[in-house]
Image (cartoon, rainbow, N blue to C red):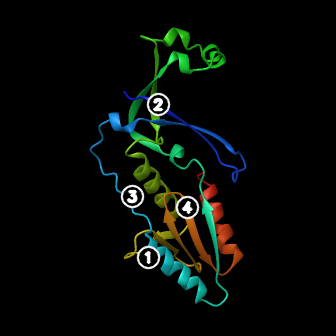
Amino acid sequence: VTYPRFTVDIRPEKSEPYRTRITAGGNLLDYDGNVTTHTANMETIKCHWNSVLSTKGAKYCTGDISNMYLCSWLKEAEYVRFHIDTIPPRIVEHYKLQGLVHNGYVYAKIKRAWYGLKQSGKIAHDDLVEHLSKYGYERTPRTEGLFKHKTRDITFTLVVDDFGIKYIKEADVDHLITAVRAKY
């Protein structure tokens, strides 16, 4: 069982600038599985940008998947405990949590990947790669974090949930957006 960590921030560049996120204290949980996530490095990204500049008619855009981690399922559940005093009274009342309090805490099962868990990044990345393969996007064989479509003239770099997309036709970007939105 681990603790929740509350993070609060103001991000004026976002559509919802007041941000609150609860993350899991992954440092208290043992996880012995593979947590390696293969993402694009700076050299790959720079080469990708260079290929945009050197390809006639090529364009570049970026994309981001919000809350990507939260859409993937853990293979094994983890647990977190919230001190009852940190839960707003209306939430306690609405979900009838008072009867679930044990030694001042309410315990919750974590079934989905969650920020702070060691395995979340790998699980979310692998889910995304598997999902995009259904739409014809595949990893390039020798360059980590670089993807291409089997038939369309579109490539992208991927770092966690951030895309750097090289394309010629708007329809190809629309296809990628549709593929990502189908999951997220």
Residue type highlighted by circle 2: Pro
Q: Which badge, 2 or 1, comes first in the chain's sequence?
A: 2
Left or right: 136, with 176 as reference point: left
Q: Which badge, 3 or 1, comes first in the chain's sequence?
A: 3
Secondary structure at badge 3 equals loop
Vertical placement of residue 89 versus 19, above or below: above
Left or right: 174, with 145 as reference point: right
Binning the other alpha carbons within 10 Å of mark 1 as few (below 14), some (14 to 19) or many (20 upward) gives few
The residue carrying mark 3 is 37
Residue type highlighted by circle 4: Asp
Q: CA distance from mark 3 to mark 1?
A: 17 Å
Do the residues bearing badges 4 and 1 touch, measured as CB atoms within 8 Å? no
- On the image, the x and y values in percent for residue 4 come to 47, 30
The residue carrying mark 1 is 43
Secondary structure at badge 1 equals helix
Q: Which residue is located at x 62 percent, y 67 percent?
A: 62
Vertical placement of residue 167 versus 134, above or below: below
The residue carrying mark 2 is 4
- On the image, the x and y values in percent for residue 160 come to 49, 58
- On the image, the x and y values in percent for residue 129 come to 47, 60
- On the image, the x and y values in percent for residue 78 come to 39, 32
Secondary structure at badge 2 equals strand
Closest to the observer, 95 or 73: 95
Q: Which badge, 4 or 2, comes first in the chain's sequence?
A: 2
Secondary structure at badge 4 equals strand
Query: Can you tell which mark lies on residue 162?
Result: 4
Q: Which residue is located at x 38 percent, y 75 percent?
A: 141
Q: Which residue is located at x 63 percent, y 13 percent?
A: 93
Binning the other alpha carbons within 10 Å of mark 3 as few (below 14), some (14 to 19) or many (20 upward) gives some
Do the residues bearing badges 4 and 2 touch, measured as CB atoms within 8 Å? no
- Which image quarter is the N terminus in? top left
Judged from this view, the residue extending furthest toward the right is 15
